[in-house]
Image (cartoon, rainbow, N blue to C red):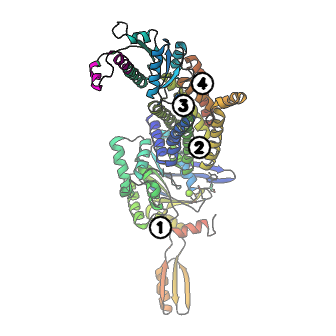
Amino acid sequence: MLKVCQLCKRFGSILAVDSLSFDAQPGEILGLLGPNGAGKTTSINMIAGLLHADAGEVDVGGLGSPTRSEVRRKIGIAPQALALYDALTGEENLRFFGRLAGLSGKALRDRVSWSLDFVLLTDRKHDRVKTYSGGMKRRINLAAALVHDPPLLLLDEPTVGVDPQSRNALFENVLAMKAQGRTVIYTTHYMEEAEKLCDRVGIMDHGAFLAFDTVARLIEAYGGHSMVTVERQNGRVQIESDDPLAECVRLQKEGEILSLRVDQPNLERVFLNLTGRAMRD
Amino acid sequence: MRKVVTTIAVNDIRLLLRDKGGAFVTFVFPLAYCIFFGLIFATHNTSPRAIDIVIVDEDHNQQSEEFVELLKQSGAVELKMASREQAMEQVRRGNHAAYVVITEGFGKASQNVRTDDRPKIEIGLDPSRKAESEVVKGLISKYAFEFFYSHINKRLVGDVPDNQHEAWSGFTPVEIETTEIVQTRTGPSSSYDISFPQGIIWGVLGCCASFGISLVNERTTGTLSRLLVAPITRTDILAGKALACFSSTLLLGTVLFVVGMVAFNVNPQAPFHLAISLLAISTAFVGIMMFISILGKTERAVSGIGWAVLLSMAMLGGGMVPRFFMPHWMQTLSTISPVSWAILAMEGAVWRGFSTSEMLLPWSVLAGVGLLFFVIGVRGFSWPDKG
Ligand SMILES: Nc1ncnc2c1ncn2[C@@H]1O[C@H](COP(=O)(O)OP(=O)(O)OP(=O)(O)O)[C@@H](O)[C@H]1O
Ligand SMILES: [Mg+2]
């Protein structure tokens, strides 16, 4: 569905994307994870045809580069920076973007109401977007990506500021779209989202992948050991272990335990191990 | 035209109307301007409410003077004495609604009601001023009737009771002959002929600024990126913007002129020329809109610099103070402002009586300005992917 080959983009002295290559299949959710400034949004914009790459190629569904307008019909994008007409209602925004994508009549009406349902905003559809809360804006921004029913979805941090209820509904819907055979490129800073949703995850920094694989294999390769934390009368001890169960049994024999916790390696550990713990700007 | 172009244009116009301030600047303010300045400069003899007629007394005797006096006393009309030639010229110029000639033999005929040659009054009317013409005809008949009624009764029976009026009904004691005088105006017929083109300019400038700013707004809010990701071309996007600005400007000019014609007696001599002028003006200001949109990176910058440019154009081009108030050298200088050509294009069709070949100059200047600025604007436009 999507092939990205040796993509490069430079802004002045900053190399925002550095020879990025990957591909995504129909029915696959692909996560892009990386610290601020890693180049995720820049990559998404190039895939959407919004930015011209300095070098490299993007191919969507075998149709060619998204710089061609008929290729862009296959793409839906929910940009990180909200892009909506504040003075229009949610429904008017969706109708407008749907029309631009060539929808009209009943097809347009159906898709607009489907998209509003999808993001749980049907009851607010007649309100102007400027009266929406931050999370609602984010949701209508996502609906605008879906309204023309594209096979490739580019979701750039779609859940920032969205409450847990809506977020869970949204996950289910993203999974439903995957089941329909759509390809989703998903960037996020929430590791549990990526673990829950993504088939494969690319960990990005300085414009390139540090690792790119399924979540399980990433954890296996970069997650390190399980961490057993034990608290006793005389203090707290943390022990790294490959076999946390055996470790627990051994600890119990050594004396009275006030509390015991086992932290399995997860994506967050992978992320921090790969990108380092230093603060980013 | 591609459907998406109209989709974008319709969306843009809707956005303009949603913005109360923008809608006010574009539609309400210009109309207020037209009326306000029309009122300020309104002069007595051009007020449509005062029916003023020119009297030509060719009989020069006691009876004719009495009749003129009777009309004067009535207070229903404003009178001015003149020769027949002067009178015709006044009506032709639109300075007066009608002229009335008391023909030779009027006095003599009025003395003798039984003769066949009845006293004769000629009325010259401007056919384009129908309402006033009818009033003048009615008034003259009424006063002629009163005049003769009193004369004849005095001689025949002395005082007659009021109900005797009925005995005369259907009988016109005086022959009234009307002539149509078609106006060939050489100047504005009223101050509204001046204030409407000026006011329309303000509406056009408002449209131009609003759409220019909205284009920048699309870039800063990111909706332009969405348009770019949609399966349409950049040409579609800019064509949609241009169409929105063009059709709003055209609609605004048309609506304001219709208001002027219906309510303020603005009476374009050449409506067809006026229509072309409005098309040419819209073309010019679409180009200028595009140019305005590249004058800054933010709405604030474009609004500030854009309005400064537009106001300078208006000031120099006679949008604030009519050009004929300007000293000669400034009038010459003002031709560098597109506004002066826009006003000339409207005035040429409204009251300057330009021929088609005379109109060609302002039309082509406006079209050229539109094209030039549009090309500059499109080339200088920074798409989000340039950064
Ligand atoms: N238009 C631009 N002009 C100059 N530099 C840019 C521009 N857009 C992005 N950059 C730079 O490119 C780099 C990558 O930015 P990008 O927005 O792709 O990061 P990101 O991974 O999406 O970050 P975040 O998680 O904060 O959204 C950053 O260093 C950023 O400063
Ligand atoms: Mg980003």
Q: Residue A192 carries which label?
A: 1
- Per the model, the C-alpha gap separating discs 1 and 4 is 68 Å
* Membership of A5 in magenta stretch: no
The mark lying in front, picked from 4 and 2, is 4
**Lateral position of residue A173 relative to residue B241, left or right:** left
Task: Determine the secondary structure under disc 3.
Answer: helix
Q: As shown in the figure, which amino acid type bears the numbered disc 2?
A: Trp
User: Is B268 located above or below residue B233 in the figure?
Assistant: above
**Lateral position of residue A176 relative to residue A3, left or right:** left
> Magenta segment, which residues?
B144-167
Labels 2 and 3 positioned on one and the same chain:
yes
Q: Position of residue B190 (x, y in %)?
A: 53, 29
Q: Which mark is residue B383?
A: 2
Q: Residue B44 carries which label?
A: 3
For marks 2 and 3 on the same chain, the one whose residue lies earlier in the sequence: 3
Task: Determine the secondary structure under disc 4.
Answer: helix
- For the residue carrying disc 2, how many other residues have a C-alpha within 10 Å: few (<14), some (14-19), or many (20+)? some
Q: Mark 1 lies on which chain?
A: A
Q: Which of B224 and A27 is in front in this view?
A: B224
Quickly name the residue at label 4: B362
Tell me whether circle 2 and circle 1 mark residues in contact (CB < 8 Å).
Answer: no
Q: As shown in the figure, which amino acid type bears the numbered disc 4?
A: Pro
Task: Determine the secondary structure under disc 2.
Answer: loop
Q: Where is residue A7 in the image (x, y as percent from the top left)?
A: 59, 49
